[in-house]
Amino acid sequence: MSSAGLPQGTVPKLERPGPLRERVYEALLELITTRVLRPGQHLVESELAGHLGVSRQPVREALQRLNTEGWVDLRPAQGAFVHEPTEDEADHLLSVRTLLEAEAARLAAAHSGSAGIAALEALCAEGERAVADDDVDLAVATSAEFHAKVMELAGNPVLAELAAQVDRRVRWYCTPVARRRGRQSWVEHRELTAAISARDEQTATSVMRTHTEHTRTTYHERVRQA
């Protein structure tokens, strides 16, 4: 399948500040991580350029960068395709995510104040509404915000930098299982918020580890049933 016919409203508008190649790269990466451009999909430079309102050159440069980073596969005489992650790739990444986020939860429990707790509670409410409305994209985006907030509350910039490196790929893997996880995911977010609020480092660590492992297990179940 080519990259033509993208759903109306799915192509992000390119903001003018900053180098064009960087903005095209960010736009394509967003389309890939939200699975508007699906794994295995053929990416045609001219079509993407038309959707984004740019020439083919910055699209070509963006695809080369995305290939280097593992988001796109450039195949000789065939063109560019969205990378199809293997089950092992997903398992390795989600295992690392568990380690990073469990430590973030522990540190957040040790350091969070009332403002941070309130922010987590607000995100839980927003995520629960998204699930009730069956808005998968919003539920995934809000979950990412929740986890980013926990990472921020941890107060460790090195940990946050490492987590940022895997954040988009985690969203890529989590989107297909978001509906399966549904409300239970937000039950776990609420449990984590309560543990952080109580400054219970041990429980916060355990809840986060269990939460991320549930997502990992659900991903593998989905792949094996496909």
Image (cartoon, grey):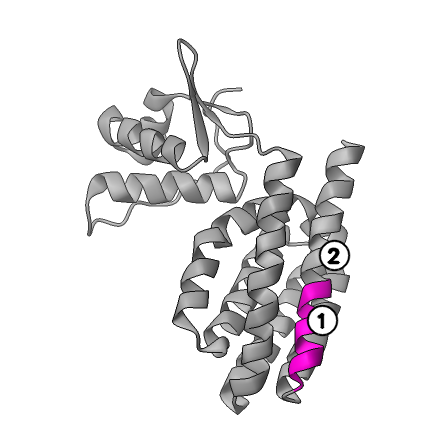
Question: Where does the image place residue 213, in percent across and percent down from the top left?
Answer: 71, 57
In this rendering, is residue 121 above or below 39?
below
- Horizontally, residue 123 falls left or right of residue 75, namely right
Picture quadrant of residue 107: bottom right
Q: Which residues are magenta?
A: 200-210
Q: Is residue 79 magenta?
A: no
Q: Position of residue 22 (x, y in %)?
A: 26, 43
* Quadrant (top left/top right/bottom left/bottom right) for the N terminus: top right
For the point 55% across and 63% down, the residue is 100
Which residue type does callout 2 highlight? His
- Name the disc covering residue 214, or none: 2
The C terminus lies in which quarter of the figure? top right
Q: CA distance from mark 2 to mark 1?
A: 10 Å
In this picture, residue 93 sits left or right of residue 73 = right
Dominant secondary structure of the residues highlighted in magenta in the image: helix
Q: Using the image as rendered, state which of residue 96 and residue 216 is in the foreground.
A: 96
Q: With respect to residue 12, does 150 lie above or below? A: below
**Mark 2 touching mark 1, by CB under 8 A?**
no
Q: Amino acid at mark 1?
A: Val
What residue is disc 1 on?
Answer: 207
Q: Residue furthest top?
A: 77
Residue 80 to residue 67: above or below: above
Out of 128 and 221, give the one closest to the viewer: 221
Residue at (62%, 33%) from the top-left corner? 86
Mark 2: give few (<14), some (14-19) or many (20+) Cα within 10 Å: some
Evaluate whether residue 189 shows in this view. no
